[in-house]
Image (tube, rainbow, N blue to C red):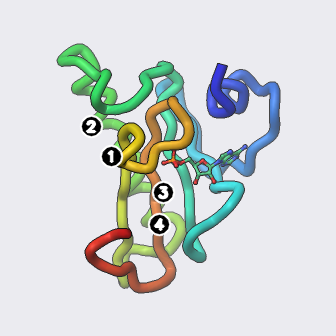
């Protein structure tokens, strides 16, 4: 069981900013920007690489929730970045799909 599955199950605490029947959004425990929220589906998909056609609506919902969280965190005016890491080279450390919502400072490009 991943740490995110344990958060979804209520076994460990998280600073939640949004939740619904399909996903939960909470603040990253080690923030990389002034605003750093993770949007996590309740369904335990490992990453977008494991998602199938049956997950298309869920993936769209996660993006819309990420945009909603960004708006509610006051990031709309200056902008923000959405990231989903996949696998070792992608820098993924938790094997449960999540979208990072990062904002509150200019983001570098290309990413490291
Ligand atoms: P990734 O490296 O893309 O898999 O992102 C995993 C993220 O989860 C990292 O930014 C971690 O700081 C974050 N993280 C790990 N454990 C927790 C936790 N218990 N609560 C909130 N965020 C966490």
> Quick check: 79 left or right of 104?
left
- Residue sitting nearer the eye, 81 or 66: 81
How many residues crowd mark 4 within 10 Å: few (<14), some (14–19), many (20+)? many
Query: Between disc 1 and disc 3, whose residue precedes?
Result: 1
Ligand 1 within 8 angstroms of badge 2 C-beta? no
User: Is 29 or 23 nearer to us in this picture?
Assistant: 29
Q: Earlier in the sequence, mark 3 or mark 2?
A: 2
Work out which residue is located at the far right of the displayed protein and give it: 12
Q: Is residue 6 above or below residue 34?
A: above
Q: Which residue is mark 1?
A: 63
Query: Percent position (x, y) of residue 16?
Result: 68, 47
Question: Viewer-nearest of labels 3 and 4?
Answer: 4
Of mark 3 and mark 4, the one earlier in the sequence is 3
Residue 93: image x %, image y %?
54, 42
Residue with the most extreme left position:
53
Circle number at residue 102: 4
**Marks 3 and 2 in Cβ contact (< 8 Å):** no
| Cα distance between the residues tagged 1 and 3 | 10 Å
Report crowding for label 1: few under 14, some 14 to 19, many 20 or more residues within 10 A (C-alpha): some
As drawn, 27 above or below 94 = below
Name which residue lies at 68% across and 32% down. 3
| Crowdedness near tag 2: few (<14), some (14–19) or many (≥20) residues, C-alpha within 10 Å | few
Q: Are marks 2 and 1 in contact (CB under 8 Å)?
A: yes
Residue 12 image-quadrant placement: top right
User: Which residue does the numbered mark 3 point to in the structure image?
Assistant: 69
Image quadrant occupied by the N terminus: top right
Can you tell which of label 4 and label 2 is closer to the viewer? 4
Viewer-nearest residue: 15 or 108: 108
Q: Report the front residue among 17 and 88.
A: 88
Residue at 23 percent across and 18 percent down: it is 52
User: What number is the disc on residue 60?
Assistant: 2
- Which secondary structure lies at badge 4? strand
């Amino acid at each position: 069981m991943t740490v995110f599955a344990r958060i979804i199950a209520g076994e460990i605490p998280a600073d939640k900013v949004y939740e619904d029947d399909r996903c939960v959004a909470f603040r990253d425990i080690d923030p990389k920007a002034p605003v750093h929220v993770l949007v996590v589906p309740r369904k335990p998909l490992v990453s977008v690489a494991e998602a199938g056609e049956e997950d298309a609506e869920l993936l769209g919902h996660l993006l819309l929730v990420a945009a909603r969280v960004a708006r509610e965190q006051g990031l709309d005016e200056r902008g923000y970045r959405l990231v989903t890491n996949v696998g070792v080279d992608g820098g993924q450390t938790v094997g449960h799909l999540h979208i990072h919502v990062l904002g509150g400072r200019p983001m570098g490009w290309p990413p490291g």
